Image (spheres, grey):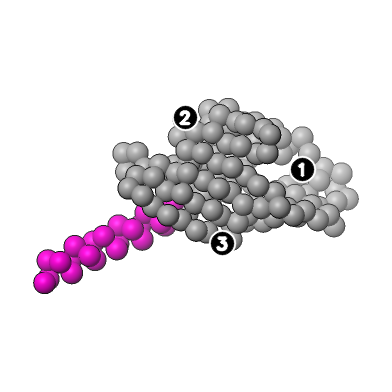
Amino acid sequence: MVDKEFEELKATVRYLKDRQDIRDCIVRESRGRDRQDVDQIASCWWEDGVDEHGAQIHHAPDYPARANKGHQMFFRQTSHNITNHLCEIDGDVAYCESYVMGGLAWLDGEKTSIALGRYVDQLERRNGEWRIKTRRCTIEMTADC
């Protein structure tokens, strides 16, 4: 009986650690973008990863610099906030949906946009590390103030 309980406890702890590592990766990627930190962004993606922002498709090796350049062209500051987070783990693959609220302060200093959307991600664990393999970003609502 004790062995069975111990195995169940180990499985539960493994699941909870995986979920936390996955969420940490997603949050760390947003933090990297807000800080224009190419290395931090890149550390969240597998080299063969793909990001889809609407019609724009980015491959992971180019994504961090392109995302930063896109933000620098229009915004003086951004804030990506991960809120609701769902995660289904299937072995070394995780399927996630994370709600994101973004504050985007335009270069002109006169306007701030708020965007609400979701990151629909597939993460993979390789050599014990979780990183993003694919991301589809949806923007579902915007407002300017």
Q: Which residue is mark 3?
A: 84
Q: Is residue 131 left or right of residue 31?
A: left
Assess whether residue 9 is covered by the magenta stretch: yes
Q: Residue furthest bottom?
A: 1
Residue 4: in magenta span: yes
Q: Position of residue 92 (x, y in %)?
A: 34, 44
Q: Residue at x 23, y 61 (%)?
A: 10
* Percent position of residue 128, x then y: 32, 43
Residue at image location 36% in from the left, 61% down from the top: 16
Q: Which residues are magenta?
A: 1-22
Q: Position of residue 106 (x, y in %)?
A: 81, 46
Q: In terms of sequence position, does the residue under pointer 2 or pointer 3 come before the other?
A: 2
Could you tell which of marks 3 and 1 lies nearer the N-terminus?
A: 1
Residue at 60% in and 31% down: 58
Q: Residues within 10 Å of mark 2 (few under 14, many from 20)?
A: few
In the visual, does 93 lie left or right of 141?
left
Residue at mark 1 to residue at mark 2: CA–CA distance: 28 Å
